Amino acid sequence: LREVYWPRNQVPPGAIRDLAEVKALYAKNALPQGLPLVRTNLSEHAQQERLPVRPGFVAKSIKVDATSSLEGHALPGSKVDVLLTYVDVDQKATKVIVENATVLSYGGHVEAPNSPLPMVGRPATYNTITLEVSRNDALTIATSERMGELSLILRPMDDIKASGPMFVDDRDIIDGRSQRHASKATGSDCSKGSVRVGGSEYLVNCDETLTQVIQPDEP
């Protein structure tokens, strides 16, 4: 703010004539540049930033840390997927539970830093992040919070195509996804039981094929 000369007959009602009058006051909205400041534009209370939630969506906050928030790079406006890591029948597993969510707020800030200068050092990190999601996705996140650990992966802004269900457990890591999926395709590692046909025993694979059981003393 600065003091300027203004024609007396053009001074608007309620104009601030002394800078001391604005001490400890807050702007109610964006102030027009180059025009006299009037009291109706000021308030004794700070204005709360509102989340820009689109119609048909809801805002859902989750707890994060420096790692799950991508070192603070999941800023407002970013697109992210939400991952859930949990224990599934004594096996650790991770699955994508929400795709292409928009970050609305990070640590209470609804706007990303806007500076033409390159970032120096690490961005600030906070412990909460708010996402714009569908109501069903909000329920999914709320349930998942009780099941395990949530984390985020950052998407390119122009990547809006859904990837579909994605799931990886510790067996995928140990055995290798391609080998495991190949064995599933042949049904060799999954059986529903066994049957005897013509005096020979067969395993009934999960894909409904049969595998003959060869006894050690058989040729």
Image (cartoon, rainbow, N blue to C red):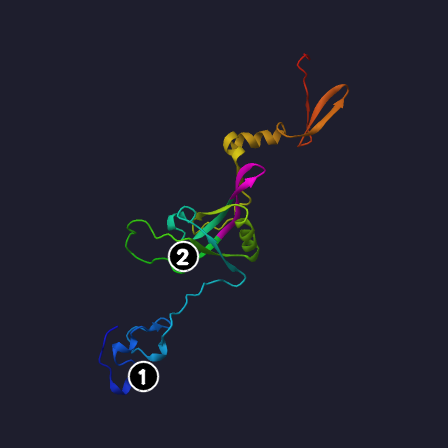
Number of residues whose C-alpha sits closer than 10 Å to that of mark 1, classed few (under 14), some (14–19) or many (20 or more): few
Q: Amino acid at mark 1?
A: Pro
- Which stretch appears magenta? 85-100
Q: Is residue 147 above or below residue 91?
A: below
Residue 143 is left or right of residue 74, and the answer is: right
Q: Is residue 94 above or below residue 193?
A: below
Residue 157, image x, y percentages = 43, 52
Tell me which corner region of the image, top left, top right, bottom left or bottom right, holds residue 207.
top right
Residue 47, image x, y percentages = 39, 69
Q: Secondary structure at mark 2?
A: loop
> Residue at position x 32%, y 49% from top?
122
- For residue 107, which numbered disc appears in the image? 2
Q: Nearer the viewer, residue 178 or 82?
A: 82
Q: Nearer the viewer, residue 135 or 78?
A: 135
> Residue at position x 34%, y 72% from top?
26
Q: Report the residue marked by disc 1.
A: 12
Image quarter where the N terminus lies is bottom left
Residue 164 is left or right of residue 204, and the answer is: left
